[in-house]
Amino acid sequence: MLRLDLHVHSDHSFDGAVPVARLLELARRRGLDGIAVTDHNRFAGSAEALRLNRDPDFLVIPGAEYTTDAGHILALFIDGPIALESGAGVLDRLPWRETVQAIHEAGGVAVLAHPFKRRTSLEPAVLAAVDGIEAFNARTVCARNRRAVTQALDLAASGRFRLRTAGSDAHWPAELGRAWVEIPHLEPGAGPAAVRAALEQGRVRVAGRGSHPLYESMSQFVRCRRLGETRRLPRVAARTVLNAVDGLAAWADGRLRRQWQVDLEP
């Protein structure tokens, strides 16, 4: 069986804190068979991970997470930066149609990331254009939309998409491996083509636990420091207080202690 965390950030993301070499070390230590490095609007983290990985039984899936005007879209299995990346800044919202097209042109699949984290409904045109959805994201357990997890899992189970993924959305070491996809019929050493085929066939198990919302606050402080966004600091500080309260409530009601595990069929 393969266990893969398909949404991981390194310090190539403006709000990430983990060097790529550390990501690879931690992933192996935590029993993962592979990760997808998906930095914000940048392929550089994936390129470094592919270069540093020397373990034939550990899989690095090249990717990125692109911010668009219809939400975040994961690009998995791309063969390099997408065409729009070269002219985009780290905070740019790319046009979603052109982003999906560019992902396909780069040989990848387009996956709608944490689809209900900040919204309760999705545009039909976006759903028709992407190849799959992220069925479970560890950071959505304490999202502003309290039904984000169940909405994503319900959409994943609806049969609309064969391709369903899961990932920790880790920006900090403690988050890595808190959500994953299990592919029962593949063993360590399986190549990216076999993994992609298995995901596209849709017979996977998604599983994981929630991440404490303070990790997201920590990421926002990193963002403010790196990008010089001092004006955002009071808002981030206020949100940190709310996240601390949300984290206590999520622990008390069992959301952060619960493990989601769902077998998905095509």
Image (cartoon, grey):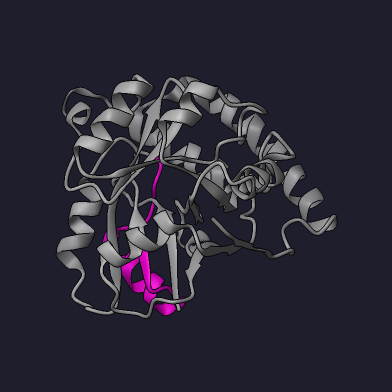
164 or 41: nearer the viewer: 164
Residue 199: image quadrant is bottom left
Judge whether residue 30 is colored magenta: yes
Up-down relation of residue 14 to residue 136 (above or below): above
Residue in the picture at 35% in, 22% down: 97
Quick one: 99 or 22, which is closer to the camera? 99
Residue 226 visible, this orientation: yes
- In the visual, does 159 lie left or right of 221? right
Judging depth in this view, the residue of 194 and 223 nearest the camera is 194
Residue 53, percent from left and from top: 21, 70
User: Height in image: 108 above or below 51?
Assistant: above
Judged left or right of residue 246, residue 43 is: left
**Residue 146 horizontal/vertical position (percent):** 74, 39
The magenta segment is: 15-35
* Above or below, 118 relative to 23: above
Residue depicted at 14% across the width and 63% down the height: 51
| Rendering quarter of residue 95 | top left
Residue 155 against residue 71 in the figure, above or below: below
Q: Position of 9 compared to 203: left or right?
A: left
Assess whether residue 106 is covered by the magenta stretch: no
**Quadrant position of the N terminus in the picture:** bottom left
Q: Residue at x 38, y 76 (%)?
A: 28
Q: Residue 235 vs residue 19: left or right?
A: right
Q: Is residue 90 visible?
A: no
